[in-house]
Image (cartoon, rainbow, N blue to C red):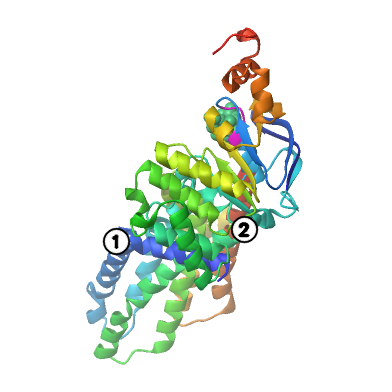
Amino acid sequence: MIQVDKITKRFGPITAADQIEFEVQRGEVLGFLGPNGAGKSTTMKILTCFLAPDSGTARVGGHDILQDPIAVRRAVGYVPENAPLYDDMTVASFLGFVCEVRGIPGTEARAAIDRVLSQCALQGVEHQTIDTLSKGYKRRVGLAQAFLHDPDILILDEPTDGLDPNQKHDVRELIRGMGQDKCIIISTHILEEVDAVCSRAIIIAQGRVLADATPAELKAKGDGKLETFFRRITLGDLVPAGGAA
Amino acid sequence: MTAMQAVMRREFRSYFGTPLAYVFLCVFLWAAAFGAFKDQLFEMRDANLRVFFSYLPWLFAFLAPAIAMRTWAEERRTGTVELLLTLPVTVRQAVLGKFFAGWAVFAIALLLTTPIVFSVEYLGDPDYGPIFAGYLGALLMSGAYLAIGTFFSALTKNQVIAFIVAAVVCLILVFLGQPSMIATLDEFPLTSWLAPFVEQMSFAVHFDLLQRGVIELRNIVFPLVVIAAFLICSVVILNEQKAR
Ligand SMILES: Nc1ncnc2c1ncn2[C@@H]1O[C@H](COP(=O)(O)OP(=O)(O)OP(=O)(O)O)[C@@H](O)[C@H]1O
Ligand SMILES: [Mg+2]
């Protein structure tokens, strides 16, 4: 459902994405790994048509990101990095706004809002101003917003950042459940999360895709540990072969 | 509901969700009443709103940038622009939605000044033509200032800079039409040919004609052209930031 075709994006001297290429099918949960500044968020922003690539293109849900960005955005649920939200709104009115922009009519909107409130364990804070929520709750509002239209494609930039262990667990369960019949890209720095939810993982560094395989295959290359492989491939020769982290 | 209407509703509510709209309305109504009733209204023995209207170009030059400064600068500073522009809404719809929300706040402000009209009605027998034309002109002028404010808000992440630059530009556009300015230009052979053009560039001139009851097409078209031009530029700037 997502085909990325040699996307390149430069910010001045920095090449944030360098000929990035990969595909994701329905039923897959793709883990997006890489050190800080690798270009994960940049790639996701391009796939959600927030940034335009310098060259290359992608098809998301059958729509070209350059030709038909609105159709892409309709098909995708996106949680941006740091989950920015309209702080002055209440949770319910914010979700109502997203329904309106997405053209979900009144009665369906009510049902959709109830559904995401329970999916993201937000029932108690429905009428609280987003400003006054704790970080983890804000994160959950960010997630809820992306699930409202029950999209086929989810692009989640560090969705579990700032969640408590129970919530991390719940969100992973949720993502794994949704992964059965959706197409999901999830970036994370938590390697056990890859094990827990991803059916495949991509490691990028300095804008380039360095590895693209199942978590089991990646682990096998790292002497049984994902972390070892991650360090070896992103730091190059600095980590001796066979040496644990 | 279309995406543009959704954006407009959200923006409109957020003006009234923060003190901004209330502070704005209080300042505006105080200044309007002060301008209308200060001294001349009763002394001129002439039932009209000329004094009130003559204040508006100056008042709006500050208030419109204050209303418009947040529109894009704040979205970019807090990162919510990424949320907004990854929803199925085009930059054009978002710009228009925000613009109309701000304009609605001005429409309400102008509506709340109608007690001044009633007072004039009580005092004498006003000619409603110029009053109606004056309100129309005021609404159009506020729209034009808002569009200018929107444009500078799209240019920067900093609300304060957006406000200052927009206010200066609005003030210049008022100044251009001041009789002293036109007279100065006229005085020198080198610049005298500029005078009629410069005069046409001023809100004050078009607005002044309207509030005298001269509803001429160009006095209505001028603010509309300014609105369109600055909103189009805002869309271009915001699209440009995407490619950066
Ligand atoms: N708007 C921007 N202007 C200039 N440089 C940018 C901009 N956005 C990103 N970059 C640069 O692009 C590179 C990739 O950034 P990106 O945010 O994609 O990294 P990331 O993989 O998401 O990192 P992290 O794990 O820290 O979230 C970085 O070097 C960053 O400094
Ligand atoms: Mg990132």
Decide which of B47, A99 is in the foreground and name it: A99
Task: Give the total of numbered labels.
Answer: 2
Amino acid carrying label 1: it is Val
| Quadrant housing residue B175 | bottom left
Number of the label disc, if any, that sits on residue A8: none
* Vertical relation: A151 (above or below) A235: below
Q: Earlier in the sequence, mark 1 or mark 2?
A: 1
Amino acid carrying label 2: it is Thr
Number of the label disc, if any, that sits on residue B90: 2
Report in which chain the residue with disc 2 lies: B
Residue A222: x and y in percent read: 64, 17
Q: Which residues, given as a range, are shown in magenta?
A: A37-41
| Quadrant housing residue A243 | top right
* Vertical relation: A118 (above or below) A44: below
Residue pictured at 45% horizontal, 39% vertical: A168
Residue pictured at 46% horizontal, 81% vertical: B133
The residue at which mark 1 appears reads as B23
Q: Can residue A245 be seen in this view?
A: yes
